[in-house]
Image (cartoon, rainbow, N blue to C red):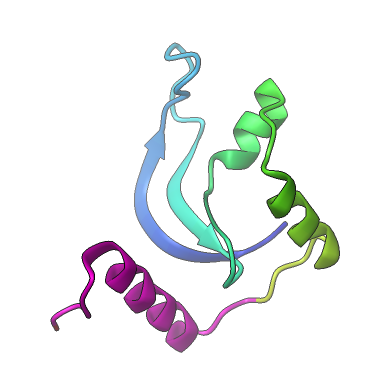
Amino acid sequence: MTASVLAVTGSMVDDVINPEKKRVAPLEVATDGEWIWPRDLSYYVREYGVALPTEFVDHIRRARWTSPQLSHEQLAELTDRLWEEIHGESPEL
C-alpha cells in the first residue's frame, strides 16, 4: 500500500529484532489520513510475520490496498491535530 509521507528524516533504521541487520528501511512515518504507521512496518511483516491490528487490516482491505495521496495542506492539518492531541495545544509558529 502506497501512502503519503507525514515525516521523513533521510536516515535509515536498523532492525530492532535482529540488531545485526543494519539500515533495513527509511526512518519515515506514513499516513492515509486516518492511520499513521512507521515506514519500516512492512519490513517487519515481511521478515518476521509481525501481526497487524485487525482494524488496520480491515481498513486497508476496504480501501482495496490503495491510499490517497494527501496534499501538503492535508498533511499540515493532520500534523497540527496530532500536535494538539500530544501537547493539548496548537503548535506555535
Specify start and end residues of the magenta stretch as a single range: 69-92
Residue nearest the observer in this picture, 34 or 64: 34
Q: Position of residue 62 (x, y in %)?
A: 84, 65
Q: Residue furthest bottom?
A: 73
On the rendered image, what quadrant is the C terminus found in? Answer: bottom left
Q: At 23% from the left edge and 71% from the top edge, which residue is drawn?
A: 88
Q: Position of residue 78 (x, y in %)?
A: 43, 76
Residue nearest the observer in this picture, 59 or 19: 59
Can you tell which quarter of the image residue 3 is in?
A: bottom right
Instruction: Check if residue 81 falls in the magenta segment.
Output: yes
Q: Position of residue 18 (x, y in %)?
A: 49, 13
Say whether residue 89 is left or right of residue 29.
Answer: left
For residue 70, above or below residue 55 = below
Residue nearest the observer in this picture, 75 or 10: 75
Q: Is residue 23 visible?
A: yes
For residue 29, above or below residue 91 = above
Instruction: Check if residue 59 falls in the magenta segment.
Output: no
Q: At 13% from the left edge and 81% from the top edge, which residue is drawn?
A: 92
Say whether residue 27 is left or right of residue 31.
Answer: left
For residue 14, above or below residue 34 = above
On the rendered image, what quadrant is the N terminus found in? Answer: bottom right
